[in-house]
Image (cartoon, helix red, strand yellow):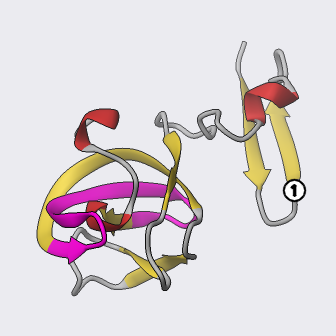
Amino acid sequence: MTTSFVIGAALGVVAFFGSGHLPSMSALSKGSPRPSAQRSYGPYRSVTNEKLWVRSAPNTEAEIAAEISPDASVYVTCWTSGETVSGRRGTSSDWLKVVSPGSGYASAAFLTVNRGDVPQC
């Protein structure tokens, strides 16, 4: 049996649907993968002095889907190639699929994650 659950991070609410065993609170604590259909990895950190934009596609022309605050915890599912961007971690064409906070792509030039830490999309 499986249990589906949703976490409302801003509200600190966990809602459970279905039947089966409920996850322990330690499984939901910081440092554990966030529940989703696809495995997520983190937390990693945003290394910006200002907000980092999460984009709808892996390039700076794509629509802004969300924003990440400086030094925020970030959870990702995978990396893909996109526009080359220069940032505090150097120059990179790697973009990470962000699942929290927000949803979309953020340049690896601004996050403390390396390509080998997560699978390719």
Classify the position of the C terminus by image quarter: top left
| Predominant SS of the magenta segment | strand
Examine the image and state in which quarter residue 27 appears: top right
- In front here: 55 or 52? 52
Location of residue 4 in the rendering, given as x and y in whole percent from the top left corner: 72, 33
Left or right of 35 in this view: 102? left
| Type of amino acid under label 1 | Gly
**Residue 99, magenta (yes or no):** yes
The answer to whether residue 121 of the structure is visible from this angle is: no
As drawn, 28 above or below 54: above
The quarter of the image holding the N terminus is top right
Which residue sits at x=76%, y=58%?
Answer: 9
- Residue shown at 49% from the left, 85% from the top: 50
Residue 38 in magenta?
A: no
Residue 16 percent location from the top left of the image: 84, 37
* Residue at the image position 59 percent from the left and 35 percent from the top: 33
Horizontal side of 76 relative to 13 (left or right) equals: left
Element at badge 1?
Answer: loop
Please tell me which residue is depicted at 50% across the width and 77% down the height of the picture.
66
* 44 and 62: which is toward the camera: 44
Q: Examine the rendering and report whether any part of residue 98 can be seen.
A: yes
Q: Mark 1 points at which residue?
A: 12
Task: Count neighbours of disc 1 (C-alpha within 10 A) and say few if under 14, some if 14 to 19, many if 20 or more.
Answer: few
Q: Is residue 54 left or right of residue 107?
A: right
- Residue stretch in magenta: 85-104
Residue 59 location, x and y as percent? 20, 76
Displayed quadrant of residue 11? bottom right
User: Does residue 99 lie above or below 17 as drawn?
Assistant: below
- From the top left corner, tell me how far across and down residue 52 is, in percent: 44, 78
Total count of labels: 1
